[in-house]
């Protein structure tokens, strides 16, 4: 099976499982689980923060961050397609009583700085108090450049606002940007976080852990966040079993993300060739540009109705949704490469699509 649905489907490696099995344990709610404490110190040092907090999921670390930065009735500026706004069940409003101020994304995944500035409310009792700017990096696989990240943090500080990064795939952004800045992915990730008050880093996506996310910030911020985590049911006691996987991932699985990016580009290039050469696919299958480990392809509805079941029967799992583009309704298919997708899986998938096209 080649499971392209998400990089959340990865299975822990044998070496990761061994670290989990042998992890020394305590009680994290009492703040004395030694492996969790080690993970939190390691991550904070890696990304340049004073402290970190381990939690079950990125949805929870984002919500903890927003509830730690904002009070009831405060406002957070977010993107229309941000996970914090669209894909996390409205938690910021429902559980945090935080008003989202969503802004339209640009084609490169950024928010216009002028739009952010214009959305900041004056100090007037008619308005919710703008307290926080949230940025997501990567966005649907698109990388927000270092210069842009710095510009947002500078704008936030100038306006007296806090700023948070939803960095679920921050390490993918760092791996993509590092060669341009002649540095390591680890140092690039640290640079991307500079000037931000907090960042959420998911361990269970491309980094390959079975569970877990980290929230990073100042000592005072993480002290507030620990209370919110307890309120949200995120205290999990002997978390060292899971934290050990996170330690292994941060030590071993960052640099290898480049292979996922290369495999995704390999897939995009192969689909582009097939779509150009095979009549059954011409004008009906369009791969979109790739920057990291996520590829979107626009497929004609009738073709998708045949191709997707064909691939599913051959063990290739995908996610797809209806979408409107300039030509009307299409099926937008998402392919996510990860440590359990090999270059051989890419080639086999392309072979299946070629065989399908020759049969139709």
Image: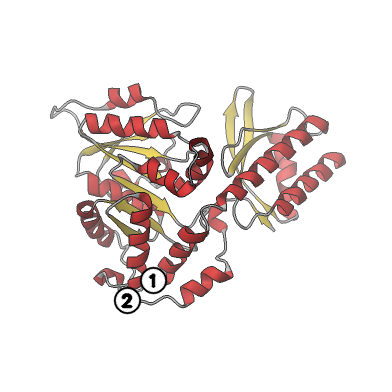
Residue position for label 1: 240
**Residue at x 31% of width, y 59% of height:** 53
The front one of 107 and 184 is 184
Residue 170 picture location, percent across and down: 45, 46
Where on the picture, by quarter, is residue 135? top left
Position of residue 269 measured from the top left corner of the image (x, y, whole percent): 71, 37
Q: Which mark is residue 265?
A: none
**Could you tell which of marks 1 and 2 lies nearer the N-terminus?**
2
Question: Which of the colour schemes (rainbow, by chain, secondary structure, one colour) is used?
Answer: secondary structure
**Which residue does the image show at 64% across and 32% down from the upper left?**
330
Query: Mark 1, residues whose alpha carbon is within 10 Å: few (<14), some, or many (≥20)?
Result: many
Q: Nearer the viewer, residue 44 or 340?
A: 44
Q: Is label 1 in contact with label 2 (beta carbons under 8 Å)? A: yes
Name the residue at 81% across, 42% down: 354
Disc 1 is placed on an element classified as helix
Q: Residue 175, position in %: x, y?
A: 52, 45
Secondary element type, mark 2:
loop
Q: Decide if residue 256 is on the left or right side of residue 74.
A: right
Name the image quarter holding the N terminus.
Answer: bottom right
Report the residue at 39% width, 25% height from top: 112
Q: Position of residue 76 (x, y in %)?
A: 28, 37
Residue labelled with disc 2: 26
């Amino acid at each position: 099976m080649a499971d392209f649905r998400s990089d959340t489907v990865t299975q822990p490696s044998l070496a990761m499982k061994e670290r989990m099995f042998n992890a020394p344990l305590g009680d994290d709610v009492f703040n004395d689980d030694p492996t969790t404490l080690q993970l939190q110190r390691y991550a904070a040092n890696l990304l340049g923060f004073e402290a970190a907090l381990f939690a079950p999921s990125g949805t929870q670390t984002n919500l903890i961050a927003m509830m730690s930065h904002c009070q009831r009735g405060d406002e957070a500026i977010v993107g229309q397609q941000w996970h914090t706004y669209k894909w996390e069940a409205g938690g910021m409003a429902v559980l945090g009583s935080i008003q989202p101020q969503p802004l339209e994304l640009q084609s490169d995944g950024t928010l216009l700085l002028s739009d952010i500035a214009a959305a900041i409310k004056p100090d007037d009792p008619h308005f919710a108090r703008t307290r926080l700017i949230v940025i997501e990096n990567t966005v649907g696989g698109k990388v927000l450049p270092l210069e842009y990240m710095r510009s947002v943090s500078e704008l936030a500080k100038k306006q007296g606002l806090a700023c948070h990064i939803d960095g679920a795939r921050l390490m993918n952004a760092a791996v993509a940007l590092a060669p341009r800045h002649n540095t390591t992915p680890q140092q690039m990730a640290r640079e991307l976080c500079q000037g931000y008050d907090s960042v959420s880093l998911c361990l269970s996506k491309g980094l390959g852990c079975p569970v877990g996310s980290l929230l990073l910030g100042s000592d005072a911020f993480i002290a507030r966040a620990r209370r919110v985590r307890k309120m949200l049911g995120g205290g999990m006691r002997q978390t060292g079993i899971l934290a050990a996987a996170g330690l292994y991932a941060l030590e071993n699985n960052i640099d290898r993300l480049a292979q996922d990016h290369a495999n995704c580009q390999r897939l995009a290039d192969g689909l582009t060739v097939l779509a150009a050469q095979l009549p059954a696919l011409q004008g009906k299958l369009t791969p979109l540009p790739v920057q990291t480990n996520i590829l979107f392809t626009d497929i004609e509805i009738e073709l998708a109705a045949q191709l997707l079941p064909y691939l599913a029967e051959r063990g290739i799992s995908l996610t797809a949704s209806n979408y409107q583009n300039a030509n009307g309704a299409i099926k937008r298919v998402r392919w996510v490469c990860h440590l359990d997708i090999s270059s051989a899986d890419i080639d086999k998938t392309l072979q299946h699509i070629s065989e399908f096209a020759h049969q139709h």
